[in-house]
Each structure stands twice: as C-alpha cells, then as structure tokens.
Amino acid sequence: MPELARAAAPLLPPLALAALVACVAGAAALANCSILAALFKTSRSGLLTIILQLAVADFILGASIGPELWSFNTRSWVFGDPGCVAYRGLNVFASTASSYLVATIALHSLATINIEEKVITKRIKRSEQDEDEEIRSSRHSLVTSSDSSTPPRTMNLDYRLADHRISVTQPSIFVWVLAISLSVPEFVLATTVHLDQNVVVCTIVDTSQRLHMYSILAVFNLFLPLLIMGTAGVLVIIKLKIKKILSQIECFESIAALKLSLWLIVVYIFLCTPRSVVTAYNIYSKSMQGNVTSLVQDDDTTVVNIATSGTYIVSTLVRPLLSISLLPHVRKLFSFGSYTQADNV
C-alpha cells in the first residue's frame, strides 16, 4: 500500500513539466505546420511528398507524447478511458509511420542517386564514343577528298532532361497501411484500470494479448526499421564518400537528400530508439509478473521513461528543422522568394 501511495506522487513539478512539454511540442507543431503549409503551395513529387507525410506523422506523434510524459510523471493516467484509447492507438500509428517514412526517404534518395549515376556513366561513354568517331573521321579526311564547305553534323544530347523522379505511391501506401494495421489492436484493446490510492493505468488488461501485441510491435517498430535504416545508412555513407561521382552530379537536391536521410537516421537511432527499447523492456518484464499492479512505476523506471519520451518528442522538432536546413528546395520556400523550378528529386 505505501508503494502505491508513493507512486501517485509526481517526480517533477507539474508546472515545470507542462511548460517544457508546451515549448517543445509547440515548437515542433509550428515547424511541422510550416512544412505542410510551404509544401502545399508548390508542386510536389518524390522526396517532397515523403517529407510532407513525415510532417503529418510527426505532428500526430508530438500531440500524443504530451499525455504520455504527464502520465509518466504523475504515475497515473488522468485523461480518461477515451483518452487512453486515442493515445495508445495514435501513438503506435504515428510512430510506425514516422519510422518507416524515414527509411523510405533514405531508400528513395539512394534510388535517385543510382539513376543519376547511370545517366552520368552513359554520358561519359557517349562522349568517349563521339571523341573516337571524331578522331577516326579526322584521320579519314587526310586520305580522302571531301567538301570542306560542308560542316560535320553533330548531335547534342541533354541528359539533364532525363526523368530522375521515382514514384513514391507504392511505398507510401505500404507505410500507412502498416501503421493502420498495427494501431487497430491498440484502439480495440486499450483501456484504463483503476488500482488502489486513485492510481489509474492505461494498458491492455490481458497479459497474453499484451505480450503478443508488443512482440509484434518490437519486430515491426524496432528491429525491422533499425535493420532497414542501418543498411541504408551504410549505403548512404558509401555514396557520400565517392567524390568522383558526386562531383559530376548536376542535381544538388539529390546530394542534399542523401545528407538529409543520413541525419534523419542518426536522429532516429539516438532520439527515438531508446524509448522503443525501454518500452519493450518494461512491457516484457512487468508482463512476466502476471498482474496489473506490477505496471505501476517506481522512481527509477519513471526517470528513464521521462528521459526517453522527452528525447522522442525532441525528434519531432529536429526532423522538420533538418528538412528546412538541408534541402535547398524547401529552404527556398521559406525565403519568401519566387521559386518555380520543377522538383526533380
């Protein structure tokens, strides 16, 4: 009984926590809304479409982390049963979407740069063939008579007109369908449980269902995104190290997209992954005890949960700022200047 009474006492001053969450979440919401407003004013294709979707996911995610931090601090859920259902469902939905959209940005950037590398290779081969043909023609003209008044015919190919855009419709549909599929059980099974000393827990009551759900979430929301992002991150670093190819690429947006994808992966690993690991550990360790009372947090667990959730909400602010600062197209939209060049990313 004393442990439950102590669990109801807030760890941090509620006013200070509310001010901190309001500042970070408000700044993140403003940054994501700015991204949405700016991209809605211009033509979007490829990378910008994914950035737009990531801003939507981060906006929802930032709104759901606030109640989570508050409940961790008070060690009791105070937003009612409908709020519990909305929080758990939207949290899984937005976190799944944001993680896979980050992976999609990395894969899309790699695919775009690979296409441009092929175009450069073809252009180099074509130039070499044209030079060889010109040399052979010059040598032939030394031994045969020809009309010098007739200039040689040449054909210039503008490889910049090649379409480098890659459709993002299919991966976008996959991401949102996966996010909806993983969030539906949370919307259906989440509920509040009232314990002693006015402690309320927002959870899935059935222990077996909770373990089954979080086993699936651990695979699709933690291990699989980390595997994809880790592989993509290594490939992005390799691409950025090849200066010979990058120096010949005329589209600076493609190089900027590579850098953005690498930074987004770093942000995800250091700011988002700890929360997923801690959440999985808490669920598995407490579910093994087989009772709902074990879900009440102690001081050490509360500190870790607040810290990891705090870094998670910071990531929703960092991601739009990275998009604005690293992508020339997006940055020009915030410069209040006219920019009508078609996006070729």
Image (cartoon, grey):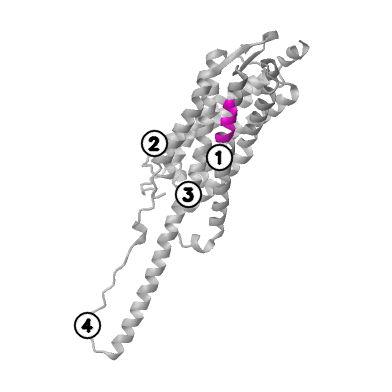
Q: Nearer the viewer, mark 1 or mark 2?
A: 1
Q: Of helix, strand and loop, which mostly describes the magenta segment? A: helix
User: What residue range appears in magenta?
Assistant: 212-220
Q: Nearer the viewer, mark 3 or mark 4?
A: 3
Give me the C-alpha separation between circle 3 and circle 2: 21 Å
Callout 1–callout 3 Cβ contact below 8 Å: no
Identity of the residue drawn at 47% across and 44% down? 331
Name the quadrant containing residue 197: top right
Q: Name the residue tied to disc 3.
A: 109
Taking the view exactly as shown, the residue that stands out farthest to the top is: 197
Q: Which one is in front, 149 or 197?
A: 197
Name the quadrant containing residue 36: top left
Coordinates of residue 149 in the picture (x, y in percent): 22, 82
Any magenta on residue 213? yes
Q: Name the residue tied to disc 4.
A: 149
Mark sitting earlier along the chain (4/2):
2
Amino acid under disc 2 = Phe
Give me the C-alpha separation between circle 1 and circle 2: 28 Å
Give me the C-alpha separation between circle 1 and circle 3: 17 Å
Q: Secondary structure at mark 4?
A: loop
Q: Secondary structure at mark 3?
A: helix
